[in-house]
Amino acid sequence: MSRTASRLDRKMDLLKMQEKEGLLKSKEGSRAVGKFIQNKLALIGLVVFAVILLSSIFAPLLTKYDPAMIDLRARLSPPSWEHLFGTDKLGRDVFARVLYGGRISILVGFGGALGAALVGVSLGTYAGYKGGWLDKILLRVSEIFMAFPQIILVLLLVSLLGQSLWNLLVIFTITGWGSVYRMARSQMLSIREEEYVQALKAFGLSDAIIAYKHMLPNALGPIMVNLTLSTAMFILEETALSFLGLGVPLHIPTWGNILNAAQDLTILQEAWWIWVPVGLVISAFVLSINFVGDGLRDSADPTQQG
Amino acid sequence: MHREKEVLLKIRNAQTYFPVQKGLLKRTVGHVRAVDNVSLDVYRGETLGLVGESGCGKTTLGKSILQLVRPTGGEFIYNFDGQEKDLRKLSNEEMMQARKRLQIVFQDPHSSLNPAFTIFGSLQDPLKKFGIKSKEERKQIIGDLLEAVNLRREYMHRYPHEFSGGQRQRIGIARALSLGPELIICDEAVSALDVSIQAQVLNLLLELKEKHKLTYIFISHDLSVVEYMSDRIAVMYLGKIVELAQAEDLFANAMHPYSQALLSAIPVAEVGRKRNRIVLEGNVPSPVDPPPGCAFHPRCPYAMEMCKTTVPELRKHIIDGREHHVACHLTDARAVTTQKTS
Amino acid sequence: MDTILTVDNLHINFYTNNRCNEAVRGVSFQLKKGRTLCLVGESGCGKSVTASSIMRLLPPLSRIEEGEIIYHTDQGDLRLHELDPNGPEIRSIRGAEIAMIFQDPMTALNPVYTVGFQIREAFMYHTKMAAAAMKEKAVELLRSMRIPAPEQRVNEYIHQYSGGMRQRAMIAMAMACNPQILIADEPTTALDVTVQAQIFDLMNDLQREHNAAILLITHDMGVVAELAHDVVVMYMGDAVENGPVEEILTKPAHPYTSALLRSIPVLGQSKSQKLEPIRGSTPDPYNRPKGCQFRPRCDFATEKCLQDPETFDVSADHTVKCWHWEKVLANA
């Protein structure tokens, strides 16, 4: 107790001295950015996120293997300098598959989140501002989608639409827009009471201009946070669906499809290198996105000071 | 005295009720009578003060005039250069044109400007809508507006958070002026400002009124400020006007018991002016279920049997040759010449 | 007259957002038994910070840099500024000897406990009363605050009270242990004037009955005129003027006080009065002017004002921090 107090006191003394000498200036630029940079966990998250994202994008520079190239002579070889993460049952290089798989998995996660956000925000912004029957109906519809067991909805849609990358994006948009809608709507409900909105109404501006041009920019902060967090969620969902064989068609490498191989008991027991590294990459990536999202949320919240 | 003056806005039996909903099915169980049968004339070029305590309906009345809140009944007859039309019955196109003439200045300088836009960005859309197509022209107009409220032209490229409360309030006034209005409703326009800044804004409002021949409806809970600004003052209690008189008459000779109590309750920054304070018992009743008869009777020191059953009407009394409207049975009984307001 | 609290040359800094803000810069006053002292000033002038420092309720990133807060008890002086803000000594004083009421009772009272329970809690910590006696005392307190049907109200929650009654319930809680000092931080700002009048009446009666000292924080000069015996005017952390209310309001010696009084409309003087606004706006606390804080807005400012003004005695108990106070007085 006394040690922490004295450390705080020393910091205060330092600040006092600096202030007196006029060293401290009002920070130019955004206070939110400064706060994000001070948040160590968020910064680590951002680095991990960037590393994984960039290595997926620049996969051809990092590995000489084609993820689809079958090399039956090197089946199930453990990690070595030749194959960093070893090879799978068909002799494909796991490291290359993790890198290339990241492209699809991240695309699916981000695309799903973006699709859900586009639908949810454009409906929620207008309905939240206007209220009335439109809002009431959309609210109930979103509740129906959220109440429906997602896995059954996915099964239904996969059997109807078939298995493909685009179908997965459509499914994620359909299942995900409800929560974004509700968030955008609640943001608009509170912004609606601000006096500048009343002032715009007093000028008789059209609803669309008031809602989308003047109000939406003020609701974007929480929506961006939600976008990052739902990206993480959709990556996990893609992984789970692909593991069950319901996601992206198996011939396309994704993180989930790599894990799919671990359904085989012998691989689970004897070829750990096929599923442990990819599992770790997924966890690290999702965790880092969550840290970044939390950091964004804290820095966007003006009530928290530090 | 006002006979020869031109009536700009004639309000007759205005009612704005809000439904009170309860339970899972949102059944309407009653109505908040925010504005309850208010009749009022606003003359061109005057400042009409509207005072009362929180929840008395003064802000709702202001917003009802602008149709920002939809009134549920009554007439709001506005004088469009000699042509009288009810604001509630205008077509969308007509209402849009009417909005040029009617504007509002808000209370909270922190929420009255959009934090995501520069001042230019916030102020340009109304101009655009009303036909000023070129960006240069809009810049010119907004610059002029800022100068009119004693701010620098360059400020139009700044964001709201770069301004102090007083400056923001002045920008809010500039915005209200942007389409050349006739009637401005000042809704607690200085209440959120520090005392040393209040006077700046009040004097600016007076100046602008002279320069642009404006009419104000000045809404505030602060009687000293209303007195400084207003020609006539209306006192509201529970959605009704209880007294309406020339400002100096109201302060010299308040006739409604509520106005008397309100005036006596205000602390005045003068030593030795210990007045006989009338301390009212109890609180303002709920506007959902106002007391029968005169809404003030449960707190009124002079309540009679009649006050519990009959709603008093706002009547015109002539006192020393000047109009003084009061809604009180007691005054009615005492007065010699009475006449129902319109 | 007995002095019960002395605040001497108090300096408080805030260290939020990695900056140092001198929120209070040398405030001194004496609080006397049975008298009301008003701390008056605009938002951000440090009046609330001064008040909460007496209770040692400052937020974590702030510190008393200099000065003394001394509580004079019958058993000798207690140096409040030296106590551990979380220690047992200050906690036994809080609520029992020095009590505080706040602007917003809805946030100052706990919504999940009954009003009666929260009053009884004060007894539990500070007295050795029996449970039945506590209950009785709580009802009695509410009755003395003129809350109707106290036997029933004592078991109700704060949301069931009306605005004025909530404030009275909070005063009841503050008065539970007959404190020597009552600190009221803008107690009526959120209330309507007719209800404000009720609360002032009540506070006046309480002071007469218990001979308590009241430290009232307000921004309203009308409230000052109505309630105060003594006034401390604050501007940007400085106590610029300090004296009895009659002198401050009729013969202000600081340019800020005098300008402030000329910029507020006075009831009953109608449109004939001329308001003289103070020019400019309050400076940024992180970018303070050199010397006298009021210099950039002051009509009397000279070269000399670049130095921090000293404290001058206007009369026996009236002090002012201004180089040109004599000119200000002569000008009035």
Image (tube, helix red, strand yellow):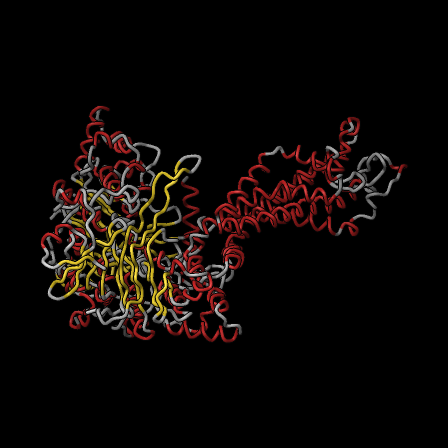
B217 in relation to A282, above or below: below
What is the x, y in percent for residue A115?
64, 48
B208 in relation to C174, above or below: below
In the displayed structure, does residue A123 sit left or right of residue A192?
A: right
Q: Is residue B59 visible?
A: yes
Task: Examine the image and state in which quarter residue A268 appears.
Answer: top right
What is the x, y in percent for residue A247?
73, 38
Frontmost residue, B143 versus B334:
B334
B145 in relation to A247, above or below: below
Frontmost residue, A299 versus C81:
A299
In the displayed structure, does residue B127 sit left or right of residue B261?
A: right
What is the x, y in percent for residue A175?
63, 40
Farthest residue, direction right: A73
For the image, the number of numbered tags is 0
In the displayed structure, does residue C169 sit left or right of residue C286?
A: left
Q: Quadrant of the C terminus of chain C?
A: bottom left
What is the x, y in percent for residue A254?
75, 41
Task: Examine the image and state in which quarter residue A155 appears.
Answer: top right
Q: Residue at x 41, y 44 (%)?
A: A5
Q: Residue at x 13, y 42 (%)?
A: B305
Frontmost residue, C14 versus A54:
A54
Q: Residue at x 75, y 39 (%)?
A: A163
Q: Is residue C249 visible?
A: no
